[in-house]
Amino acid sequence: MRNFTNVTDIGDLHAAVKQALEVKANRFAYQHLGKNRTLLMIFFNSSLRTRLSTQKAALNLGMNVIVLDVNQGAWKLETERGVIMDGDKPEHLLEAIPVMGCYCDVIGVRSFARFENKRDDYEETIINQFIKYSGRPVFSMEAATRHPLQSFADLITIEEYKATPRPRVVLTWAPHPKALPQAVPNSFAEWMNAAEDIDFVIANPEGYDLAPEFVGNAPVYHHQDEALKNADFVYAKNWSAYADPNYGKVLSTDRSWTITSEKMALTNNAYFMHCLPVRRNMIVSDAVIESERSLVIPEAANREISAQVVLMRILESL
Ligand code: CP
C-alpha cells in the first residue's frame, strides 16, 4: 500500500482487522520496518488523538517522527494556484510540499474541509496535492471528506465487542453548536458499508443526508427512535449539511437528537461510540458516556493500532 486515504486502499477488511488484532497483541515486534525511516506529520488543524496515537504507532515501529503545525511557526501557505502572492502568505504549498518530502520517508496529513468551496473539499485538493508533489507515500490523518484511521479503529472496536455475527450499527446525527465537516460520518459509512457482516443504518434530520456515494445502500431514517430499535452499537456524530444550497451550514441544534439513557433504552443494550472530542449534553448525556456501555476510550486506544497497521503496510512498500 503506497497511500492511504480511503477504505479501498486497505483492501480486504477481514485481513486488516485480523492483522490489527495481531499487532495489538505484539505491537513492538515490527521495529525492523521503521529503523532509519522518518515520519513527517503535518497538521493544518488541531488534534489530540490523531497526533498522539499516530506518533506512538510510529515509535512502536522504531521510526523517527517530526511534526509540523502549519499554523504555528511555519510560513503562512498559499494553496491556490494562479494567485498573485502580494498578501500575507509568503510561501506556496507547491514549493512547500516537495521541500517537506525531502526530509522524510512517509507523510501524514490532517486537512479538514474548509467550507469555502464544496468542489474543492470533495475533490480533496490539499491531500491530493501532497500525493502528487511530495514524492512520498501519503496517508490521511483526516482530510476534507474522510477520516479513515478513525473508521479503521472503529471497525476494530466493533469486532472486539460485537456479541452477534451481524450486529446492527446505527450512525446517528446529534446536535452541536458549530458547523462540523462530514468527514467522520462519511468515512464511518464507507467502512461500515464495505464490511459485509454489519447491518448498517443512518439516522439524521431532514436536510442532513450525507453524500449518496457514502450512504450507499444503507437505509436512512429521519426519525432517530425508529433507527435505534434493536441497535447493538450507536455511533453518534454531528455533521453540517451536505446538500446545496446549505453545504457546510448548521440547520438544527435540536436536542431531542441528543443520545440519552432514554434513547439507549430503545436499543438492544447497545454500546455507545463517538470518535471524540465530544460535547457532553449536546451529543451525549453524561450518564451515557460514563456508562459501562460507552466505548469512547477503547475506540481512542485503537487509533494507535489502526495507525500502526497503516504505517506497517506503507513501510513494507518502500
Ligand atoms: N478523533 C480524532 O481524530 O481526534 P483528534 O481530532 O483529537 O485527533
Image (cartoon, rainbow, N blue to C red):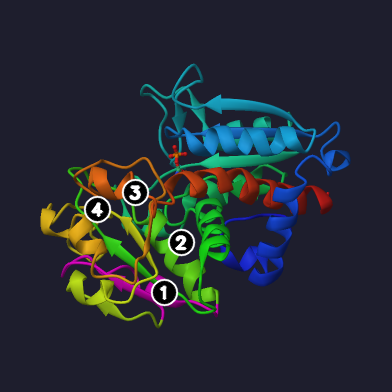
Q: In the figure, residue 39 lies in which quadrant? A: top right
Q: Residue at x 37, y 74 (%)?
A: 215
Q: Quadrant of ligand 1?
A: top left
Q: Choose between 119 and 259: the one closer to the eye.
A: 259
Residue 156 percent location from the top left of the image: 58, 59
Q: Which residue is mark 3?
A: 291
Q: Which residue is mark 1?
A: 213
Q: Choose between 131 and 291: the one closer to the eye.
A: 291
209 in the magenta segment: yes
Q: Are marks 2 and 3 in contact (CB under 8 Å)?
A: no
Q: Nearer the viewer, mark 3 or mark 1?
A: 3
Q: CA distance from mark 1 to mark 2?
A: 11 Å
Q: Secondary structure at mark 1?
A: helix
The three-letter code of the residue at mark 2 reads Ser
Q: Tell me which segment is drawn in magenta.
A: 196-216
Q: Is residue 99 above or below residue 262?
A: above
For label 1, count other residues whose C-alpha is less than 10 Å away and answer few (under 14), some (14-19) or many (20+): few
Can residue 252 be seen by looking at this rendering?
no
Q: Which residue is mark 2?
A: 187
Q: Nearer the viewer, mark 4 or mark 2?
A: 2
Q: Residue at x 60, y 27 (%)?
A: 67
Q: CA distance from mark 3 to mark 1?
A: 34 Å
Q: Residue at x 28, y 77 (%)?
A: 220
Residue 245 percent location from the top left of the image: 17, 62
From the Cβ of disc 3, is ligand 1 less than 8 Å away? no
The three-letter code of the residue at mark 3 reads Ser
Q: CA distance from mark 4 to mark 2?
A: 17 Å
